[in-house]
Amino acid sequence: MNPANPTMNATFSEILRALEPARTVLVASHLRPDGDALGSTIAFALWLKSIGKEVAAWNEDGMLEKFRYLPEADLVAAPSGSGRKFDAFIALDTSVKNRLGTVLDAIEEPATFINIDHHISNARFGALNYIDSASPATGQIVFEFLKAAGAKITPAIAANLFAAISTDTGSFQYPNTTARTFQVAAELIEAGVNVGALSQAMYDTQPRRRLELLRHALNEVKFFFEGKVASFSLTQADVARLGVLPEDNEGIIDHLRSVDGVIAAVFFEELEGGKVRVSSRSKDPRVDVCKVCGLFGGGGHALAAGARMSGGIAEVAEKFLKALGDEVGRIA
């Protein structure tokens, strides 16, 4: 199935029609998943199961410990087997195809490949694509899709979508949060979300090792370009010493970005195989970190983007910070 114009969005009706004949469906999202990726995956999988589909929900990293509070979290598993056949594949919250990771290695690619996402840098790799970069979260797009499908929003689906939207909007704080986002949140609460319990699980429950990571970040933070950029680095030796997991990194960068005078923050994480994961955040729309990450093969959103770069962590940091400094210097 190849649309005549892959730059155009498929309609929800077209996606529904494509799914109708499918008996087996795989739902997956990007490696190193966040709350939006996993919440959207579980919600979509629950709906598919409710209409009689045989569903697998995969992520290269499986279900992360920190998101086990999500209802039906055990639906998400690491890829199993090889050459598995599915009638349809739904990729959620994934801007480039290779970020699906080992999920791609485990399947025989189906004809019906559907790509639903909100990243402006999405490469439109599906046979059917629905990309809405104005949406603050893929979870909000999934909600609109399920509404259009006439789906019953169960309490479990509602909680997963609420978590997806809340975590990807910084608890409804980021600039792309709209009036519609609050309307969707209200409908999800009416469908059965226990806001207090869910919020406590999302924001007030963390392992002690994450506090140790935050202590390390605050001790190691460096400021550049007259205090407009803050960054910190995490080597593999640091990881071993602190005993942290990759999922513990999420949100640490926000502490750096929150410093008065800082416009952009960057986190450099040393990976195996001579790679460095770069995570960047901006709080000024004039400083487009997606543009900077794009220089190094990455992408995301204007105010939140990432990349994976080859080289030593000091070398990568120097290259990236120079490019970011050029971007920041344009508004000085």
Image (spheres, grey):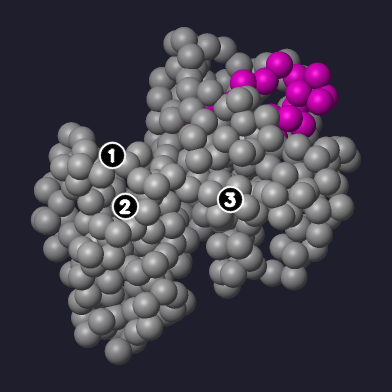
Residue 319: x %, y % from top left: 16, 62
Residue at image mark 3: 202
Residue at image mark 2: 212
Q: Residues within 10 Å of mark 3 (few under 14, many from 20)?
A: some
- Residue drawn at point x = 58 percent, y = 50 percent: 202
- Residue drawn at point x = 50 percent, y = 45 percent: 34
Identity of the residue furthest to the front in this view? 208
Compared across the picture, whether 316 is left or right of 37 comes to: left
Q: Secondary structure at mark 3?
A: helix
Q: Amino acid at mark 1?
A: Gly
Q: Label 3 to label 1, Cα distance in Å?
A: 22 Å
Residue 316: x %, y % from top left: 17, 55
Q: Which residues are magenta?
A: 44-59
Tell me, yes or no, whether the two marked residues, 3 and 2, touch with CB atoms within 8 Å: no
Residue at image mark 1: 243
- Looking at marks 3 and 1 on the same chain, the residue that comes earlier in the sequence is marked by 3
Residues 256 and 294: in front is 256
Asked whether the viewer can see residue 141, the reply is no
Q: Amino acid at mark 2?
A: Glu
Residue 227: x %, y % from top left: 25, 82
Q: Residues within 10 Å of mark 1 (few under 14, many from 20)?
A: few
